[in-house]
Image (cartoon, helix red, strand yellow):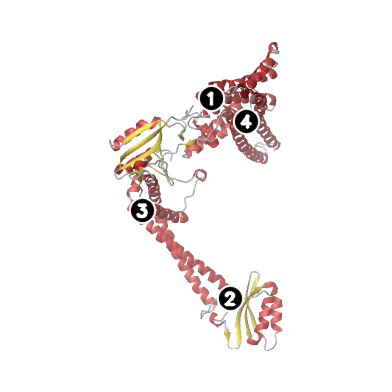
């Protein structure tokens, strides 16, 4: 249906043209190059081999690491504050292609900036380390600031021990009492300070009392503190530390100012990084291509629509370049690119999450899209919610440069919001029951059975389509009889069963006796169809009983059909919750004469409906996808295709206006 026709290409040329060819292919971004799979002929294996330049690759990787480090220094001290949108989409620097080329032309200046960033970053790290050490030293001494003797004096002096003691405050009284009870000549103890839950003491005692003091200190969970041996008092040392801290912080402020000047060059470094990253990708691909002494060779894939442009590009590089394009060989793994109408393309995100189609398989997107949009509309079915969802997605699509699945997803939600608004308009759903008017179709909360009937009818149509697509796939593969005896008879049997159940509501009473006969005939044909195929008659006859078990699949079909009743449940839950929110809002009697009620009602209205909108959108999307994956795709779709991944320019830091998407 919408799988792009793909060609396998072979390109050969002079070795000195290899870099130009890869650069141009990367700029175009529509050729996937196979690496690591192409092998030379056995007779020429010695002449053809991958030729890379590991030194150049290593140099580029080193340069990228240096640029990253410089940008990290800038981001650390002057980070870019993201807007609300950028918090979800990421931050990129916008620039035109002319600005991009101008930045690249100033590479020498950029490396000067990178060197300065590295030096400033190292100076800052050293400064931070010194500040950390100073803070630790201050923390050690601040408790002893009132000690009036030099720190070098706190040691054993002859028969006397001089100690600094730290102990928990809960042991303070017991500690002082025990010190007083020591044998003569006793000990001298002075409380220096109390900070937090600890008390700090200066203690002098004689050598013969050392053992008893150690037992006392252990009992009180006390610690002997070592704070250095300077010939100055703690207060003098602290004063010096504070002066040094002030100098370091002043130096730190100077470093910040220097870095602030360099931050103006950040776009230049970002452009240089992205350019070198793209160059590294080309080198990595070039290193895996087969080359001889003077020639290079590559194989890859391209969609047929871009083949003529590729021929023109290669001829512009050199008329000696050889290009051959062939159809994929049977059984070959071909990368798949989808080609759908712009209105269908957003629904590809649903298929991509499940798994893309194989090259020889139908793309289910066009068949799935109408059902997805209708199911979403029925599940949400609110004019206010739908318009709010579409407005939000429209704003994001305009303000955020999106590509790939993100752009498809928000475009899909935008279209789904319009569908919800349409069905909400038909069913008189506007933020629940905020606005009452006669429905143009019906009111789901008043007629839930009708909504269930609509969901089941739509589900039946989609399930029939799934079986029909399976038959179409068999016909495409040349299995005409299989399509008739498998899917054709199966649809005949299901139709007869459905008519047997609903012929009265359809006004077909006159044919009441015909439908049982049709069901019996179709069931018999399904059973007998199992005898077809190769093999002796009696061997094929033994396969007939298996056809009876095939009829059991009708239970699975109706089970799948009942799964579509979730559309009714989702539609009713969102509508009823919206009505409950409005009921609580009306309880506050909001009006300009009742400002308190007005504010409370607005808070409940906005908060409640916002929560209901988020939950309803999430439920509608998830359950809608489930119906496609489990009920619809299961009938005909296998998936497992390999997505088309061309060599293309990628940008981590910048976004080019001219390209629109990067």
The mark nearer the N terminus, 2 or 1, is: 2
How far apart are the alpha carbons under marks 1 and 4? 34 Å
Q: Are marks 3 and 2 in contact (CB under 8 Å)?
A: no
Q: Outermost residue toward the top?
A: 510
Q: Is residue 83 above or below residue 231?
A: above
Q: Are marks 4 and 2 in contact (CB under 8 Å)?
A: no
Q: Are marks 1 and 3 in contact (CB under 8 Å)?
A: no
Q: Which mark is residue 453?
A: none
Q: Outermost residue toward the left?
A: 319
The mark nearer the N terminus, 4 or 3, is: 3
The mark nearer the N terminus, 3 or 2, is: 3
**Mark 1 closeness class: few <14, some 14–19, many ≥20 residues within 10 Å:** some
Query: Circle 1 sits on which residue?
Result: 474
Query: Circle 3 sits on which residue?
Result: 55
How far apart are the alpha carbons under marks 3 and 2? 59 Å
Residue at image coords 63%, 19%: 525
**Secondary structure type for disc 4:** helix
The mark nearer the N terminus, 1 or 3, is: 3
Q: Nearer the viewer, mark 4 or mark 3?
A: 3
Q: Is residue 1 left or right of residue 184?
A: left
**Secondary structure type for disc 3:** helix
Query: Circle 2 sits on which residue?
Result: 144
Q: Nearer the viewer, residue 605 or 217?
A: 217
How far apart are the alpha carbons under marks 1 and 3? 54 Å
Query: What is the quadrant of the C terminus in the image?
Result: top left
**Mark 2 closeness class: few <14, some 14–19, many ≥20 residues within 10 Å:** many
Q: Nearer the viewer, residue 662 or 302?
A: 302
Q: Which mark is residue 379?
A: 4
The mark nearer the N terminus, 1 or 4, is: 4
How far apart are the alpha carbons under marks 4 and 2? 73 Å
How far apart are the alpha carbons under marks 2 and 1? 91 Å
Give the image quarter of residue 490.
top right
């Amino acid at each position: 249906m919408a799988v792009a026709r793909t060609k396998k290409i072979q390109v050969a040329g002079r070795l000195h043209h290899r870099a130009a060819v890869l650069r141009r292919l990367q700029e175009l971004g529509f050729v996937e190059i196979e690496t690591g799979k192409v092998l030379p002929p056995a007779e020429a294996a010695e002449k053809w081999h991958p030729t890379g330049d590991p030194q150049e690759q290593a140099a580029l990787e080193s340069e990228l690491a240096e640029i990253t480090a410089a940008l990290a220094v800038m981001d650390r001290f002057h980070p870019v504050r993201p807007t609300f949108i950028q918090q979800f989409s990421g931050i990129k620097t916008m620039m035109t292609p002319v600005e991009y080329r101008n930045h690249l032309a100033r590479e020498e200046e950029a490396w000067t900036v990178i060197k300065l960033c590295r030096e400033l970053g190292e100076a800052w790290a050293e400064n931070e380390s010194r500040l950390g050490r100073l803070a630790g030293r201050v923390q050690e001494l601040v408790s002893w600031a009132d000690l009036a003797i030099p720190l070098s004096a706190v040691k054993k002096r002859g028969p006397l021990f001089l100690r600094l003691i730290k102990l928990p405050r809960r042991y303070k009284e017991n500690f002082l009492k025990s010190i007083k009870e020591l044998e003569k000549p006793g000990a001298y103890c002075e409380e220096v300070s109390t900070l937090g839950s600890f008390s700090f003491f200066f203690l002098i005692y004689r050598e013969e009392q050392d053992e008893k003091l150690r037992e006392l200190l252990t009992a009180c969970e006390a610690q002997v503190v070592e704070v250095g041996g300077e010939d100055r008092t703690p207060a003098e040392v602290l004063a010096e530390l504070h002066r040094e801290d002030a100098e370091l912080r002043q130096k730190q402020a100077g470093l910040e100012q220097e870095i602030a000047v360099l931050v103006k060059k950040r776009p230049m470094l970002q452009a240089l990084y992205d350019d070198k990253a793209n160059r590294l990708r080309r080198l990595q691909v070039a290193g895996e291509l087969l080359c001889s002494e003077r020639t290079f060779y590559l194989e890859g894939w391209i969609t047929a629509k871009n083949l003529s442009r590729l021929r023109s590009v290669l001829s512009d590089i050199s008329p000696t370049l050889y290009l051959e394009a062939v159809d994929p060989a049977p059984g070959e793994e071909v990368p798949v690119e989808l080609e759908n109408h712009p209105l269908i393309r957003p629904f590809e995100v649903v298929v991509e999450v499940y798994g893309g189609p194989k090259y020889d398989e139908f793309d289910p997107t066009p068949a799935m899209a109408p059902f997805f949009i209708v199911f979403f509309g029925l599940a949400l079915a609110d004019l206010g919610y739908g318009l709010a969802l579409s407005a939000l997605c429209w704003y994001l699509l305009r303000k955020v440069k999106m590509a790939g699945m993100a752009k498809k997803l928000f475009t899909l939600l935008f279209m789904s919001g319009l569908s919800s608004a349409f069905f909400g308009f038909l069913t008189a759903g506007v933020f629940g029951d905020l606005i009452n008017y006669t429905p143009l179709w019906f009111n789901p909360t008043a007629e839930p059975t009708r909504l269930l009937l609509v969901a089941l009818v739509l589900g039946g149509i989609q399930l029939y389509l799934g079986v029909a697509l399976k038959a179409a796939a068999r016909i495409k593969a040349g299995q005409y009889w299989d399509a008739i005896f498998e899917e054709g008879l199966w649809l005949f049997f299901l139709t007869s069963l459905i008519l047997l159940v609903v012929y009265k509501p359809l006004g077909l009473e006159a044919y009441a006796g015909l439908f049982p006969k049709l069901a019996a005939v179709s069931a018999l044909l399904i059973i007998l169809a199992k005898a077809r195929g190769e093999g002796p008659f009696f061997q094929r006859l033994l396969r007939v009983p298996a056809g009876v078990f095939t009829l059991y699949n009708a239970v699975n079909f109706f089970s799948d059909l009942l799964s579509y009743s979730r559309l009714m449940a989702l539609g009713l839950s969102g509508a009823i919750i919206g009505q409950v929110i409005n009921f609580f809002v009306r309880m506050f009697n909001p009006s300009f004469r009742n400002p308190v009620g007005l504010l409370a009602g607005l808070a409940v209205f906005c908060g409640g409906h916002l929560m209901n909108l988020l939950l309803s959108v999430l439920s509608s999307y998830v359950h809608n996808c489930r119906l496609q994956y489990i009920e619809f795709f299961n009938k005909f779709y296998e998936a497992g295709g390999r997505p088309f991944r061309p060599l293309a320019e990628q940008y981590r830091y910048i976004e080019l206006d001219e390209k629109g998407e990067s």
